Structures are given as C-alpha cells and as structure tokens.
Image (cartoon, rainbow, N blue to C red):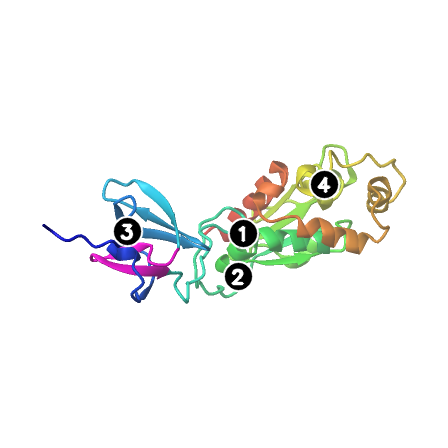
C-alpha cells in the first residue's frame, strides 16, 4: 500500500524559509490558491494587482508565502524605492513636460491688476509660463493703463497682454481699456468685481459669493458676510490654498488667460 503523509499542508505553505521578492512592475507570479497568473501592474500598501495575458486584473493581499515565482513560493513585498509619480498634466490642464527648464524670458509681458491676480495666475499657469518664457507683472490698479502701455511700447517682438478685473460694458475699467489701441497690445478681462470671485464657490465650500453693497470695500464685506476674520490678506491665502487646478476657476477667467498667453507667445 502507498504511504500518505499525515501532513496535508500544500507545499507552498510549509514552514521552510522563502525569499522576499520586490513586487516590481512586470514581475510574473502565480497566486496558488486561485491559480491566477499574471504580471504585477501595481503594488500598494497591503495589496498587489496582477494582470493576466487576457488583460484581466485581480487584486491580492501581500501575505507571507502568498505567491509562486517560477513554481517556487515567495513573499512579495513593496519595492524599497518607488520612483515618484509625476503628473501628466499641469494645473492649467496642459501636458506636463518633466524636467523642462524655464525658457529665457521674452521681451513680451502679461500685466495683471494686483498681487492676488498674479498669485492666482502663477499657481495655475506657472508651469506653462516658465516653459514659454512669459513674465507676469502686477500693477497697482489700471487707472493709468494707457500711459503704462505707451511706455512699454509693444511691438512684434515685445507683445503686451493685460488682464483687467470687472471688464464689463459701461464700467470704469471698460472705458480705460477702450483707450488702449494697437495690434501688439491686448486687453482682456473677466466680469468679476475682484479676482476672488473667479474661484468657484463650490471649491471653497460656500453656496455663492455674497453681494456687497456699493460703496463698501468688497473684500472686507465678503469676509464679514462669510464670517471670516477681517484680514483680507489671510482670507485670500485661504482662498488660494483651495485652488488646485483650472477646474477650481470660472471659465470666464480661463479663457482670458489663455488668450493672453497665446497673444504674447505668437511667433
């Protein structure tokens, strides 16, 4: 009679030492309990995802003696050094160019009304602007815009773009913008009283930007209406921190900035 061992434990689960193998992408292993065989496509805390030759994915726990490598039991572990995942898109939605160096600054410029405008443009379009070599500068208001543009002297190799707040027909800003002429200077604007309003309320967890009576400082009024401390600088930093990409901004601002970048970088 054939003698059978009383130990019915599968060979891959017996107590002999097994090597630890990093679950590198592309490593082909088998999960013996199910017979699923596939290549590692992802390894996260506590789990590994395999893809078989038919493209089917299965997720398994990372446990001792959990897999067979070339028929031998192994313990898969997370790779000791995982290269950081680089974003494929910039905050503006453009294709990211990893490792790209900033271009030497162009003679052309983009002017915005104030520091908050400049900080918002930098946060969302900064990567694009550096690659294109476009410098953004902020003005202290646009009351003297025609003289500023004349002093800049825009030309074919030094185009100027200006972003203006509250550029709606009949407004003071509208009348000032109408005084700027010339094919190498482009003035565009959004309809909002302040650049703050170009941030979507939903990104800030509020229903809407409050209506502030005319004659009252708009930013201070917003802080009061929303119950924020009346420190507009700190309030703005809180708003800016909630902007992660173009998706947090209103389309009216997105179109303006993209037009300015195109205008300044035209060959």
Element type where label 2 sits in the image? loop
Horizontal and vertical percent for residue 71?
20, 56
Q: Of tags 3 and 2, which is closer to the observer?
A: 3
Can residue 68 be found in the magenta stretch?
yes
**Residue 240 located within the stretch drawn in magenta:** no
> Residue at point 59% right, 54% down?
154
- Residue at 35% across / 59% down in the picture? 76
Which circle's residue, 1 or 3, is located before the other in the chain?
3
- Locate residue 105 relative to residue 21 in the image: left or right: right
Residue 98 visible: yes
Residue annotated with mark 3: 39
Q: Magenta region: which residues?
A: 63-76
- Alpha-carbon neighbours of circle 4 within 10 Å: few (<14), some, or many (≥20)? some
Q: CA distance from mark 3 to mark 2?
A: 48 Å
Residue that numbered label 1 is attached to:
264
**Residue 168 appears in which quarter of the rendering?**
top right
Query: Which labelled disc corresponds to residue 106?
Result: 2
Contact between marks 2 and 1 (CB within 8 A): the answer is yes
């Amino acid at each position: 009679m054939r003698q059978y061992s009383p130990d019915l434990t599968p060979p891959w689960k017996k107590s002999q030492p097994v090597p630890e193998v990093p679950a590198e992408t592309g490593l082909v292993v088998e999960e013996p309990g199910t017979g699923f065989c596939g290549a590692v496509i992802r390894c996260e805390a506590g789990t590994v995802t395999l893809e078989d030759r038919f493209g089917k994915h299965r997720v398994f726990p990372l446990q001792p003696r959990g897999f067979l490598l070339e028929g031998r039991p192994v313990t898969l572990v997370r790779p000791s050094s995982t290269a950081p995942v680089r974003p494929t898109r910039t905050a503006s939605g453009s294709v990211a160019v990893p490792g790209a160096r900033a271009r030497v600054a162009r003679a052309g410029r983009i002017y915005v009304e104030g520091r908050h405008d400049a900080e918002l443009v930098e946060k969302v379009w900064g990567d694009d602007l550096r690659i294109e070599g476009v410098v953004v500068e902020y003005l202290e208001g646009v009351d003297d815009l025609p003289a500023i543009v004349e002093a800049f002297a825009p030309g074919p190799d030094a185009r100027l773009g200006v972003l203006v707040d509250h550029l709606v027909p009949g407004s003071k800003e509208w009348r000032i913008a109408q005084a700027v002429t010339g094919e190498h200077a482009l003035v565009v604007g959004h309809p909002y009283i302040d650049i703050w309003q170009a941030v979507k309320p939903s990104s800030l967890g509020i229903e809407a930007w409050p209506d502030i009576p005319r004659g009252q400082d708009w930013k201070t009024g917003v802080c009061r209406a929303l119950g924020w401390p009346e420190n507009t600088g700190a309030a703005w930093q809180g708003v800016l921190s909630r902007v992660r990409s173009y998706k947090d901004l209103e389309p009216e601002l997105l179109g303006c900035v993209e037009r300015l970048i195109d205008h300044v970088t035209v060959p």
